[in-house]
Image (cartoon, helix red, strand yellow):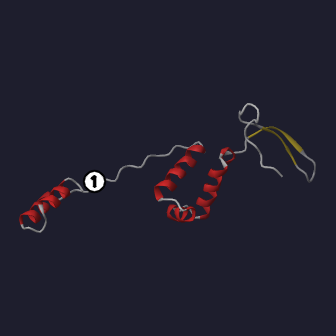
Amino acid sequence: MYPVINECPICKEPLVVTRLHCRNCDTSVEGHFTLGRFHSLSPEQIFFAETFIRCEGKINRVGEELNLSYPTVRARLHDLIRAMGYEVKEEEAAPTPVVDRKAVLDELASGVITAEIAARKLAGG
């Protein structure tokens, strides 16, 4: 058995399934059928999807199994989502923590921290 191809080997346009056949009872059905979203994925994307499912969607486990960094796994997941025709929602940036300016200045005044550390804390770093 050979895997079903999804594009014409001549012009590279998408192929449409027009006939289904049962080997058991010799019934054939003709029409225009879709193979679904997974059929348009590359072999690498299918492998990634299978790994992601096997790892129960846990990005850290996928990274360990494929020896990839967390950002790389997320990027591949986003590529997979887009390849399946879905939109990837951009994550909202985490809110910057509110710095207690008075506490930082009090620490500086009492000598607990240096001016350099105080400046860094006040700048949000």
- As drawn, is 46 to the left or to the right of 96? right
- In this view, the residue in front, 50 or 64, is 64
| Residue at horizontal 47 percent and vertical 59 percent from the top | 70
For residue 45, above or below residue 7:
below
Q: Quadrant of the C terminus?
A: bottom left
Quarter residue 124 falls in: bottom left
| Residue at horizontal 63 percent and vertical 51 percent from the top | 44
- In this view, the residue in front, 50 or 19, is 50
Q: Residue type at mark 1: give it.
A: Thr
How many neighbours does mark 1 have within 10 angstroms: few (below 14), some (14-19), or many (20 or more)? few
- Toward the top, the furthest residue is 11
x, y percent for residue 22: 88, 49
x, y percent for residue 71: 46, 55
For residue 67, above or below residue 1:
below
Q: Determine the secondary structure under disc 1.
A: loop
- As drawn, is 41 to the left or to the right of 96? right
- As drawn, is 22 to the left or to the right of 7? right
Quarter residue 117 falls in: bottom left
x, y percent for residue 101: 14, 57
Quarter residue 34 falls in: top right
- As drawn, is 1 to the left or to the right of 13? right
Count the labels in the image: 1
Residue receiving disc 1: 96
| Residue at horizontal 52 percent and vertical 43 percent from the top | 87
